[in-house]
Amino acid sequence: MNKELLFAIAVLVAGILCLIKVYLDRKGEKLSGVVSGFVNSDGYDFAVIRFQYNGQELEARAANAEGRKGKHAEGDRVDIVYRPGKAKYVNIVGDNYDIYIAVAITICGLALVILRLIK
């Protein structure tokens, strides 16, 4: 196998792994919460969401772009997906940016593999 085909396969696998992550991020408890503040991470302000789960009040940082400052204000009610196994983060419902990226990477990888195979 040449390096170009290996690279194409690597891009395809990366895209598939991204799609799996997107799927898993959407599997969880769908809850309602309130933006309780913002925390800076890598130069971006992400919402901190306060919500109830199994009778406990919890707070977690929004992990997706929908949670960036400017999209929501402190006190806004938001729908979230909470995965107890990933308790530090929640996903705010309505952001599909990660899906677009995962699909684009997968399509690019598939196209590169096909081009390398027919070449």
Image (tube, helix red, strand yellow):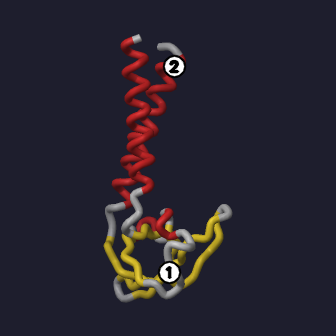
Front position in the image: 104 or 117: 104
Q: Which quadrant would residue 97 be assigned to in this image?
A: bottom left
Q: Where is residue 37 in the image (x, y as percent from the top left)?
A: 57, 82
Q: Residues within 10 Å of mark 2 (few under 14, many from 20)?
A: few
Q: Which quadrant would residue 113 be assigned to in this image?
A: top left
**Residue shown at 45% from the left, 70% from the top:** 90
Question: Which residue, given by chain and number where applicable, does mark 1 sit on?
Answer: 59
Q: In this view, does 97 lie above or below 7?
A: below
Q: Residues within 10 Å of mark 1 (few under 14, many from 20)?
A: some
Indicate the secondary structure of the residue bearing disc 1. Answer: strand
**Residue shown at 54% from the left, 69% from the top:** 68
Question: Which residue, given by chain and number where applicable, does mark 2 sit on?
Answer: 4
N-terminal of the two: label 2 or label 1?
Answer: 2
Residue type beneath disc 2: Glu
Q: In this view, does 62 lie above or below 74?
A: above
Q: In this view, does 102 lie above or below 81?
A: above
